[in-house]
Amino acid sequence: MAKKPKVAFFDFASCEGDQLQIANLEERLLDILEHLDVVSFREVSSRRGEDYDIAFVEGSITRLQDEDRLRGIRAQAKILVALGACACIGGINCLKNFLAENVYREEVYGQYARWYGTYAARPLSAVVKVDAEIHGCPIDPNDFARQVKELLLGKAPSNPDYPVCVDCKKAGNICRYDLGRPCLGIITRAGCGAVCVTQGAHCWGCRGLSPHANLDAARLVMDRAGFGRKEAQNLLRFFLGHTAATL
Amino acid sequence: MPFKKDFSPYVPRPATLKEKKKLSELVTLFTFELDNGKALAHRPGQFIQLSIFGVGEAPFSVSSPPDPSKQTFELAVRKIGAVTQSLHAMAPGQKVAIRGPYGTSFPVLDFVGKDTLFVAGGLGYIPLRSLLHYQLRHRSEFGRIIVLVGCRNPQERIFTDQIEELTARKDVEVLETVDIPDAAWKGNVGVITTLFPKIPIDPTNTSVAMVGPPIMYRFVLAECRKLGINPNNIFVSLERKMKCGVGKCGHCMINDLNTCMDGPVFRYTDIEAYQEAI
Amino acid sequence: MDAYIVHLERLPALFNAWAKDSALSVPSATPEGFYEFIPWNGEAEIAWDYDLIYNPPKRFVMPAKETLISFDLKDLQAKPVFEAPAQIVFGMHPYDVKAISQLDQLMELGIPDQNYLKRREATVIMALTPQSVAETAFWASVGAEEVQHGFDLYWTKIGPASFLVEVGSKKGEELLHAAAPPTRATVSEKEAARRAKIKVNQFARRKQLLYNWEETPRLLAKNWDSPLWRKNSETCLACGSCNLVCPTCYCFDLVDEVDDKLETGTRSRSWDGCMLTSFALVAGDHNFRPKALDRYRHRYFRKGKYIYDKIGELGCVGCGRCVRACTANIANPLAVFNALWEESTHAF
């Protein structure tokens, strides 16, 4: 790109943790921003602009009025990048999708529930075309840097299409199943470097289903490893509420 | 050992884009010159690895014939992946990096004195063009030159000017077909095998060079068999995911063959028994 | 072959001497109860009787990610990058040594891969006769129970505190003399080592192929269409775990990375696996091994036939890592080969 592309950041239902992760790049962010013209980024600047080429959008869509706003962003942006699990796959916001609408409305808004419109949470891609996805909850700042650089070099940003097991084996971790613990790494899209397992936890599935995930096999594996349907389902619902994994 | 200890097969050398010519909506012909001033020194059917640093590396067949008098070489590239997208966005004067040439080539001597049947499906014309133009330059060494060209539709035809020139020549027989015609198409309609009955072929004295989409080979080979062409005289070039180009990375394997080293050009009888080949 | 006797109490001095110039790794128990090679820190407790090192030792000669070239985005100049730190891996079981010898051959074959070969040259391998056998291992039935080459020293415990050390290279012998000179082994000590090897190999044979391992290529050749490939691969997660933990798998991907200023960058290779769905995918979305069946079969043919056809040994050394790593329970070369054997008629 000859001219510096103008970029803007937006958020919907989310914690803004992904934008914070970008701010966490600190010195590196300065180098990367050399190639960009940031017209709107609440986490690092007070500037607000409405003219942009690349839109980074965080959060999931949970209300009808979100859809119009998102379509507006889509119409303006040449490239729309979903930022984080909520935007890419619906994320933990989708937990409410397993409750009746009146139940989650009242849970949040109490007696004022009927004043607020809110529906089943969904990823951006359920409403508009998404050009690139930076996965994770939260995103890995290095992954953000990588994808932005790819955009700048004119390459369509890409994500691994294999499960976290690949990253995990490269990291040299002990498999959670060898420790008798459940793990969604077997069906979750890699690219995180298996950071959760490396840190002693297990994979929660925050990067969404690996495109070729074998869900039947995964259910069998979890079942054989002694994790009942309930336990497996709870784990799958945590991030993968908007996928076939929970069916 | 002929290799120096600090030799790395993974290091490409810079080359400059000299010319760009659009061949179809998605396919463009790129002319490159190595910055070291040397010729590429490839043989017909070989491929190179082209790098756009930061974007990646991808294999491409060389489309121009070997020509000691020229320092340039040509690649015809369809805009389809990351590297090709970037390549299409480049302007003459810009640089890429090249490794190779790699792999086997069409054994030119096997074609000398015989008729040659070229079977080019879709982008298969690109690597075959190297052998075809080599033969045209040494026309008297070869018998009949029969060129069958098939495309999905008229819009996807490539090298149309050159094919027209060939058609006009007395010493080359060209037949074209498309799978799906448009209103303006007056030529043959149907898959490439529908061209076979339209031209007399002497099975005892014909060598075949075929390149096309994976689905094509089985059907064209069946036609060759029907004609009674000796399978020893059939040469195919196979596409696979050549990544390292030097027989290490494992991506391009056809059973236990490394397409990057043992191929991409194979004598049909050498791969007939390989389940993953055709 | 020259052999020496080294007593346990002399080891710390030797290790400390070696660790001065090289990164020394030794087998040690992990908190979870598995075993890994860990850097020698002067006092690490060595797991003499480990059954299996959890992760394959290939990372010493071919790290999970390794830079091959560096490049300049402006002038398109590229330079090779070679990294070859001096390192010593102490206590490698013979099947793992054999796996590395196999990589040596394959990376040298044809166009030599200097990134690998330089790293290998800077690596000293000290083999160790196993004292335990992993539940999933079957190395004694695939000709990987002992090695004749590929090591610099070969250690065998012959008494409560004494080792017979066979010399595999000049470098190895020099290292053995890094502290006080060792004593030469007597004939009876050599015999004791031989017996120790026989003993563990016999125990390891409790898990066995039903046939001589050299028949594997022929067995596979006639079982291309076996229903086993489809049946087993139905539950394949396409996670690549079997590839990645395999000590002889070396397939790799090439990836570019550029600096934040977009001025320079590197191209690295990282471990890849033929079980991953897109392994044979080309531009234009044509996948040459589209089905799990295709990929699963390819892996077993690679291990049992293709490698053999190239260098005359199986691509499987029987370590059993894939058996454990496959959560779907389908990666078990011993079970696969035996099932094929039982299903086949043996008219060859």
Image (cartoon, rainbow, N blue to C red):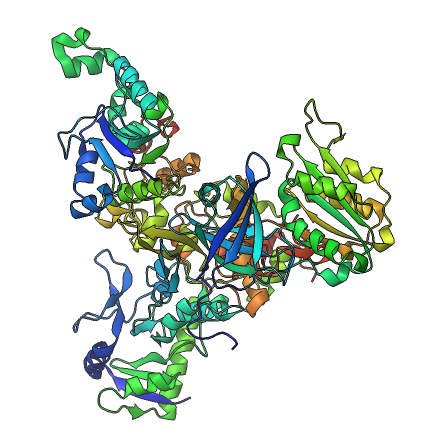
Q: For this rendering, which residue is in front, C302 or B14? A: B14
On the picture, is C72 further left or further right than C243? left
User: Could you say which quadrant of the image residue B270 lies in?
Assistant: bottom right
Q: For this rendering, which residue is in front, C292 or C318? A: C292
Looking at the picture, how far across and down is residue C35, in whole percent? 28, 62
Is the residue C110 above or below the residue B243 in the image? below
On the picture, is C143 further left or further right than B271? left
On the picture, is C341 further left or further right than C86? right
User: Could you say which quadrant of the image residue C95 lies in?
Assistant: bottom left
Placement of the N terminus of chain A among the 4 image quadrants:
top left
Is the residue C147 above or below the residue B213 in the image? below
Q: Residue furthest top?
A: A114
Q: For this rendering, which residue is in front, C126 or B258? A: B258
Looking at the picture, how far across and down is residue A165, in whole percent? 35, 47
Is the residue A100 above or below the residue C159 in the image? above
Measuring 52% from the left and 69% from the top, which residue is drawn there?
C109
User: Could you say which quadrant of the image residue B141 lies in?
Assistant: bottom right
Looking at the picture, how far across and down is residue A119, in whole percent? 27, 15
Placement of the C terminus of chain A among the 4 image quadrants:
top left
Looking at the picture, how far across and down is residue C328, in whole percent? 42, 44
Total numbered badges shown on the rendered structure: 0
Residue C45 visible within the image: yes
Residue A230 visible within the image: no
